[in-house]
Amino acid sequence: MLELCGRLVQKLGDVLPEEIQEPVLRDAQWTFESAVQENVSINGQTWQEASDNYFMDSDIKVLEDQFDEIIVDIATKCKQYPRKILEHVIKIIKAKQEILKQYHPVVHSLDLKYDLDPTKDCPQRIWYPLRPKRISLHI
């Protein structure tokens, strides 16, 4: 963890002017490391008391077994729950379809009146009955 955050402090120092970069980075790195060592405890032990090889092989094996059990549990839930969810989705869709079947929009009809007198709305128009015209051809 200290190495990872130490690289972050180095990257932050890249934006500083070169004449103050080295002392500021050294001070920031020391401040960060001392703050971590004073405030972080590992299973109730201080940073100095805890060793780097804290986890034994047996502890790692137990953690791996627990992790495997969790993966199996999640995988079975991923298979079961979509089926259960699907049942509820189908019920909801069917209920919506039933509601839509019962919906009948109310449409009020308009009374349209048609006047057979075409000259009424336009007095300039004169109604002539249609009759075929006679065409005479002279040959």
Image (tube, grey):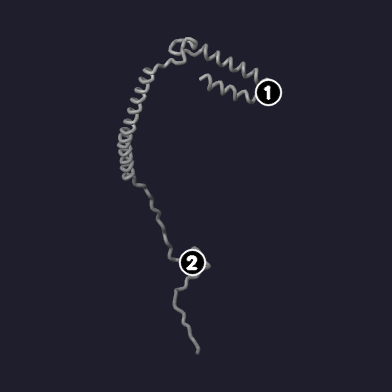
* Residue 14, percent from left and from top: 63, 25
**Mark 1 or mark 2, which is nearer the start of the sequence?**
1
Label disc, if present, on residue 119 of the rendered structure: 2
Q: Secondary structure at mark 2?
A: loop
Residues tagged 2 and 1 counted as in contact (Cβ below 8 A): no
Give the CA separation, mark 2 to mark 1. 98 Å
Element type at mark 1: helix
Pinpoint residue 38: horizontal percent, then vertical percent.
Answer: 52, 11
Residue 45 rendering spot, x and y as whole percentages: 45, 10
Q: What residue do we see at 59% from left, 23% from top?
A: 10
Residue at the image position 49 percent from the left and 12 percent from the top: 47
Residue at 44% across, 10% down: 44
Nearest to the observer: residue 50 or residue 69: 50
Q: Position of residue 89 (x, y in %)?
A: 33, 37
Q: Can you say whether 105 is above or below 117 in the image?
A: above
- In the picture of the structure, the residue carrying the numbered disc 1 is 18
